[in-house]
Amino acid sequence: MHLGRKNAGKRAIMVLNVDSEGRIKVYGAVVSAEQYISSEARELKDQLRVPGQAAPAELPVPVVLRADKGTKFYLVNHVIKLCQDNGYAQFSLSAMTGEGDK
């Protein structure tokens, strides 16, 4: 299991925290958004691949994006686009106010 994937019952979720500068943090560690998201997607596609068939185009794992209150929308949108480009289609967004959200 990688840093950002949690199990919610039998369904995994990927949690990405976006700070006010647009950096991705996974359990407090700053990671390259492009590398992390593509690596997670590639691993998941490999796990879901059925012999003799192509990997699924749409991944069944929801992405939870948590952004600092001051994060500009275009930075969050960039992360969403990276996820979509790698096959993620289910999203949940949350703004952290700094009052116990972290």
Image: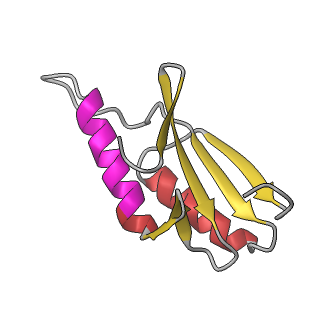
Residue 89, x across and y down, in percent = 54, 41
Left or right, 49 with reference to 65: left
Q: Residue at x 56, y 63 (%)?
A: 79
Q: Which residues are magenta?
A: 36-48
Q: Is residue 7 above or below residue 63?
A: above
Q: Quadrant of residue 80?
A: bottom right
Q: 70 or 82, which lies in front?
A: 70
Q: Residue at x 50, y 24 (%)?
A: 11
From the top left corner, tell me how far across and down residue 45 is, in percent: 30, 37
Q: Is residue 39 magenta?
A: yes
Q: Is residue 30 left or right of residue 95?
A: left
**Residue at 29 percent of width and 47 percent of height:** 42
Q: Is residue 90 magenta?
A: no
Magenta stretch, main secondary structure, is: helix
The residue sitting at the bottom extreme is: 21
Say which quadrant the N terminus sits in: top left
Nearer-the-camera pick, 34 or 31: 31
Where residue 57 sits: x, y (%)? 37, 37
Rendered image coloring scheme = secondary structure
Which residue is drawn at the image coordinates 72% and 49% (left, top)?
93
Q: Quadrant of the C terminus?
A: bottom right
